[in-house]
Image (cartoon, helix red, strand yellow):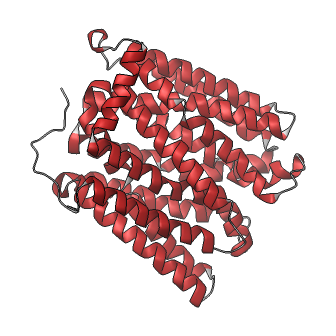
Amino acid sequence: MIASLMALNALAIDIMLPALRQIATDFVVSDPNDQQLVILAYVLGFGAPQLVWGPLADRFGRRAVVFVALLGYSIMGFGAFAAESFHQLLAMRFIQGVFAAGCRVVAVAVVRDVYKGRGMAQVMSLVMTVFMVVPITSPMVGQAVLYFAQWEMVFGVLGSVGLALLAWTFFRLEETLPSEQRTQLDVRGIFGGYLAILRSRTSLGYMLAGGVIFGSLFSYIAVSEQLFREVFGITDTFAFWFAGVAIMLTAASYMNSRLVRRFGMRRLSHMALVGFTTLAALLLVLMRVVGEEIWLFFPIFASTFGLFGLLGANFNALAMEPLGKSAGSASAAYGFVTTTGAAAIGGAIANTYDGTTTPLLLGFTGLGLTCLSIIAITERGRLFVDPPEEDDAMAG
């Protein structure tokens, strides 16, 4: 259920990738790069509202908040289905992202209510493993919808899935935040929760690092359809190539769930970050020297994203670990930085697309180096070392 709540976000992004060109054509969008706005509008709506959903989840509990969020997500899906202009579509997408933010905040907060430390990283890895099935299958579902209907039906699917999950959570999701542990919804309480994040060197550092490195994910998603079609000449099989990259992410997330208790969150994520940066730089050089050939690009690029799959769950757990008393606010802050900040970074990189792989790979390399620098500062230069800890699977 937690994986499904988080997967709503990936579904809303990835299911329409095959439809972007058709949407741009039907609405007579002049600049081909503007089709990326269908993705970026949603992501921008998803980011900042998490800062509101977090305190609401800490005050009113997890169930009430997720019910409102799922209902709004569904309504906006059907609203996008009925959009009569490109600007109306972007508005509906933005608002749908706002409601999806509540689903994401509650999902992570529920996990933090029950788990902590390496236990949380292990559970989040398993959640991410299930969650990554959505990017694998969503473009294929979107392509299948286009075979039988117009692109509007893609948004109808989003609305229907939201309603189905609303029914599931209503009957099956238990409240994980007892009433006596809820915070007051006032200015002091809200800012106190966010101030605790700024005071924690570990939380702040890994939150910023997550925001930087997730920029690579958003830049790839925004430009992926153009990249495969225009650079490598791949058209009808785009969904399968996109799924191949997602499969590597899924495998890495599952591997992380098996390895994190043995090797620790820091050691795994630091090594993966070094490998991610190295492979991105290597691929950048190869594409310039050998040429942009899909047989060379794809295996190295997919391996790079496989290493990315070892970062998300570990960075999340490291940032959340010191903030168990305000899991909703902590989840909101981390989600805000890793979406709004990452979307801005990813959008800037994607907008420099020039018909080659160079801007994307150059962005990957720069983001990897920046993220590594942030972590080195956070850990005071002590990389690849996890402090010894007790069996901390359960939080309470």
Q: Quadrant of the C terminus?
A: top left
Residue drawn at (42%, 35%), measured in percent from left and top?
333
Q: How many marks?
A: 0
Q: Along the horizontal axis of the image, is 136 left or right of 18?
A: left
Residue 217 image position (x, y, % from top left): 52, 56
Q: Position of residue 120 (x, y in %)?
A: 27, 40
Q: Nearer the viewer, residue 222 or 391?
A: 222
x, y percent for residue 12: 62, 41
Q: Nearer the viewer, residue 139 or 47?
A: 47
Task: Give left or right: position of 126 versus 20.
Answer: left
Q: Is residue 137 above or below residue 376?
A: above
In this image, 345 relative to 15: left or right?
A: left
Above-or-below relation of 377 to 175:
below
Q: Please tell me in which quadrant of the rendered image residue 251 appears.
A: bottom left
Residue in view at x 59 percent, y 42 percent: 11
Residue at 51% x, 27% y: name it: 102
Instruction: Indicate the quadrant where residue 355 lies.
Output: bottom right
Q: Which image quarter is the N terminus in?
A: top left
Q: Indicate the quadrant where residue 380 lies.
A: bottom left
Q: Is residue 123 above or below residue 59?
A: below
* Residue drawn at 58 percent across, 55 percent down: 346
* Residue 110 visible at all: no
- The one of 320 and 192 positioned closer to us in this rendering: 192
**Is residue 257 visible in this depiction of the protein?**
yes
